[in-house]
Image (cartoon, rainbow, N blue to C red):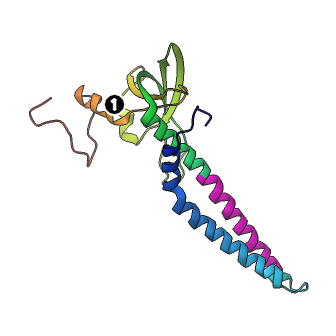
Amino acid sequence: MAIGPLSWPLLLQSVRRHLAFFFILFSLGLSFAAVGGGMLWFADSGDGGVMFGGGLFALIGIGIIITAVVTNFSSIGYYYERALLRKYGANVDGEVLAVTQYNEPENEEEVLWLLRFRYAYVGRCHEGEAFLPDEKWLSQFGVGDWVPLRVLKPRPKYAEPRWRKWKKQLQRAGRWQAGPGEADSRPAGGG
């Protein structure tokens, strides 16, 4: 995240969104660790079952605390970059390179589709990837089609598609087929 000067208001906004989740996980992990530590502290040396249970509780608690720290750090970084992109991003046009299936779903898992795109910013060519919001997007465009993007100015390798703009553009061109349960947003008289 070494992008330049830190934007404290955006960072604090991202942190505020995650404080409740962090403290819930942290306090749950602390509770487990405290119970496990207490069991280990007060157990007799010959009582192996209590020592095993205490050690297991303590390890679970430590694992939950580590999970709380790592997941929140990662999530705060992601939402901070998104906020930077909204505030300091530049709009550019790109080109669809490919759409590939990202995962092999098991049972009733959702299929994830990865969109690869190319764009130029300040005279340099970059490539990026993004997950499609849902499967309705698969039939709406092809390789070589135009894609509107938002690029982070200090770090132009970070770009995301502007989904709403792209959908409206496809609707205006008559290429967006409304899926089941989705109302067509075009006026009744055509257009």
Along the viewing direction, whichever of 35 and 138 lies nearer the viewer: 35
In percent of the image, x 77 and y 80: which residue is there? 38
Number of residues whose C-alpha sits closer than 10 Å to that of mark 1, classed few (under 14), some (14–19) or many (20 or more): some
Q: Which residues are magenta?
A: 51-72
In percent of the image, x 52 and y 56: which residue is there? 18
Residue 80 is situated, as x and y percent measured from the top left of the image, at 52, 43
Residue 158 is situated, as x and y percent measured from the top left of the image, at 53, 30
The local secondary structure at tag 1 comes to helix
Residue 17 is situated, as x and y percent measured from the top left of the image, at 48, 55
Identify the residue position indicated by label 1 in the image: 166
Residue 114 seen: no
Give the residue type at disc 1. Trp
Quadrant the N terminus occupies:
top right
Q: Main secondary structure of the magenta part?
A: helix
In magenta segment, residue 57: yes
In percent of the image, x 49 and y 16: which residue is there? 122
Along the viewing direction, whichever of 148 and 83 lies nearer the viewer: 83
In magenta segment, residue 11: no
